[in-house]
Amino acid sequence: MNPKKYSKTEQFAIVSILILIMEADGVIDPNEEEFLNRILSTFKITEPELEIISSYSFSQCREILSGMGADELLDVKSIFTEMAKCDGYTDPRELEIINRIV
């Protein structure tokens, strides 16, 4: 994944949705935490930026991501799907979030 492909606002929206996916089934698996930490590192997101990200609403994220090109959206869907699979089980609630975005 090339982080330069996404604006900071898009990166924040991606991370916000990843967190929603991670929390969707009520269980945060260590593999999900590890995946999220890799994305945070790739995007070079700091603790203060996580505070900003936590204020993003689902509809705000959807609006931000809807402005992306088709190729970028496919990449983002792949990132979201990878998060959903991290714990070895793709919960229907995780898929619902992904399907509402892309």
Image (spheres, rainbow, N blue to C red):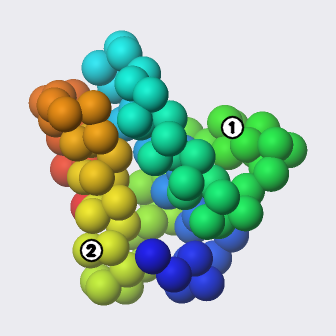
Q: Is residue 30 visible?
A: yes
- For the residues labelled 1 and 2, the Cα–Cα distance comes to 25 Å
Q: Which residue is mark 2?
A: 74
Q: Secondary structure at mark 1?
A: loop
Q: Secondary structure at mark 2?
A: helix
Earlier-in-chain disc, 1 versus 2? 1
Question: Residue at left 61%, top 66%?
Answer: 42
Q: Position of residue 16 (x, y in %)?
A: 54, 45
Q: Which residue is mark 1?
A: 55
- Of 24 and 99, nearer the camera is 24
Question: Residue at left 16%, top 31%?
Answer: 89
Q: Position of residue 102 (x, y in %)?
A: 26, 61
* Pointer 2 local density, CA inside 10 Å: few below 14, some 14–19, many at least 20: few
Q: Amino acid at mark 2?
A: Leu
Q: Is residue 44 above or below residue 5?
A: above
Question: Residue at left 25%, top 52%?
Answer: 81
Q: Position of residue 63 (x, y in %)?
A: 46, 60
Q: Amino acid at mark 1?
A: Ser
Q: Is residue 74 above or below residue 60?
A: below
- Quadrant of residue 101 in the image? bottom left
